[in-house]
């Protein structure tokens, strides 16, 4: 997301997805400067960073966890409901101005 501000070009993280071949691939992009891979990716189990508003941390974690679980359920467990969840972009429906969901 946009919170990868320590990098000169956080949008560069979008490029690999744009270049990969289509098929069962999704990108969730969070348009919030507080959302970076280190705070909610590498340290997904904690909300201990004092610089991040605690009110954002838990919802971001829940979003990532539910999306990851849906992906595993869809493509490892082969659950049709989970695949529908992803294909219809449900992870981003709750906040369409904040979340960008792309599939290919």
Image (cartoon, helix red, strand yellow):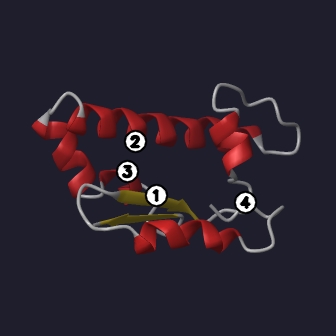
Q: CA distance from mark 1 to mark 4?
A: 13 Å
Name the element at disc 3: helix
Residue 91 disc label: 3
Which of labels 3 and 4 is toward the front? 4
Which of labels 2 and 3 is toward the front? 2
Where does label 2 land, which residue?
A: 67
Where does label 4 land, which residue?
A: 3
Q: Residues within 10 Å of mark 1 (few under 14, many from 20)?
A: some
Which of labels 1 and 3 is toward the front? 1
Q: Residues within 10 Å of mark 2 (few under 14, many from 20)?
A: some
Q: Position of residue 59 (x, y in %)?
A: 57, 40
Q: CA distance from mark 1 to mark 3?
A: 8 Å
Give the residue drawn at x 88%, y 37%: 50
Q: Earlier in the sequence, mark 1 or mark 3?
A: 1
Name the element at disc 4: loop
Q: CA distance from mark 1 to mark 2?
A: 9 Å
């Amino acid at each position: 997301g946009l919170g990868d501000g320590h990098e000169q070009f956080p949008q560069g993280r979008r490029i690999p997805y744009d270049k990969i071949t289509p098929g069962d691939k999704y990108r969730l992009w969070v348009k919030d400067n507080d959302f970076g891979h280190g705070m909610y990716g590498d340290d997904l189990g904690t909300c201990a960073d004092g610089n991040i508003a605690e009110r954002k941390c838990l919802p971001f974690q829940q979003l990532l966890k539910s999306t990851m679980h849906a992906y595993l359920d869809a493509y490892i467990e082969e659950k049709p409901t989970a695949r529908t969840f992803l294909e219809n972009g449900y992870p981003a429906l709750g906040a369409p101005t904040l979340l960008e969901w792309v599939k290919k």
